[in-house]
Image (spheres, helix red, strand yellow):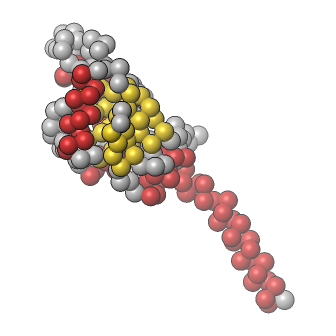
């Protein structure tokens, strides 16, 4: 059975700051973990080589270790998701529990993979990104709000709008991937075909 993703509407959550630029897909999910073909379990190996040392001991000081930061929003440095095009990177971020990644620039292939897998990439200005990172680092309990219908992200009194492809926006709002979207059109297409058939037969009758 084809499974839909969670619907994305308005997300209010604490955030995890990762102010490192040029984070590539091999850092997000190292190549040695790409053997699996299902999406589950990849979150365990998200940022594996930053989270654990060679003995699988959590590395103190890495942002996902220690419990200081948590939440469903990852705030990352510029040029996130560059490098080789692996859909597993989006799977790992989603499976870990993130529903949105905020950055001032995303690699195109990663951005598309994220959108196809229920993960919202939010592009903000460099200035607003610096503001978000500073706010979250200063106060880890700070909540950010991402309003997909309005296409706005806010932290406290500051907010900024973001762009998103209208089709991808509709898919996220409904929890659709491309297949779900086509299935959702099926009823409308059938109804249209029936009307056309009836119109055609009445014209010839």
- Give the percent coordinates (x, y) of residue 105: 22, 47
Q: Quadrant of the N terminus?
A: top right
- Point out the image quarter for the C terminus: bottom right
Q: Residue at x 28, y 26 (%)?
A: 136
Q: 42 or 184: which is nearer to us?
A: 184
Residue 90 makes an appearance in the image? no
Q: Residue at x 19, y 44 (%)?
A: 126
Judge whether 162 appears above or below 1 on screen. Answer: below
Q: Say how many tags the image has.
A: 0
Residue 43 placement, left or right of 54? right
Q: Residue 107: in sight, yes or no?
A: yes
Q: Quadrant of residue 187?
A: bottom right
Question: Farthest residue in the bottom direction?
Answer: 204
Task: Single out the residue that lies furthest toward the right.
Answer: 205
Q: Residue 68 in the image: x percent, y percent?
A: 29, 15
40, above or below 51, in the image? below
Q: Quadrant of residue 18?
A: top left
Nearer the observer, 121 or 46 = 121
Q: Nearer the viewer, residue 16 or 180?
A: 16
Give the residue at x 36% y 32%.
Answer: 156
User: What residue lies at 33% left-to-right and 46% top-to-bottom?
Assistant: 160
Left or right, 44 with respect to 182, comes to left
Residue 51 x/y as whole percent:
22, 19
The x, y position of residue 39, in whole percent, is 41, 33
Above or below for 189 versus 200: above
């Amino acid at each position: 059975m084809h499974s839909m993703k969670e619907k994305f509407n308005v997300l209010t959550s604490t955030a995890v700051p990762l102010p490192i630029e040029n984070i590539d897909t091999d850092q997000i999910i190292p190549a040695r973990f790409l053997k699996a073909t299902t999406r589950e379990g990849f979150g365990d190996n998200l940022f594996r080589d930053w989270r654990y040392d060679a003995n699988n001991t959590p590395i103190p000081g890495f942002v996902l270790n220690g419990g200081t930061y948590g939440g469903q929003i990852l705030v990352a440095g510029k040029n996130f998701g560059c490098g080789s095009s692996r859909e597993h990177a989006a799977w790992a971020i989603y499976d870990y529990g993130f529903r949105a990644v905020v950055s001032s620039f995303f690699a195109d292939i990663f951005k598309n993979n994220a959108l196809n897998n229920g993960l919202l990439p939010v592009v903000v200005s460099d200035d607003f990104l610096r503001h978000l990172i500073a706010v979250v680092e200063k106060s880890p309990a700070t909540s950010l709000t991402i309003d997909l219908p309005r296409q706005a992200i806010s932290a406290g009194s500051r907010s900024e709008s973001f762009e998103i492809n209208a089709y991808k926006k509709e898919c996220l709002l409904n929890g659709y991937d491309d297949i779900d979207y086509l299935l959702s059109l099926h009823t409308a297409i059938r109804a249209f075909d029936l009307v056309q058939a009836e119109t055609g037969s009445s014209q010839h009758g």
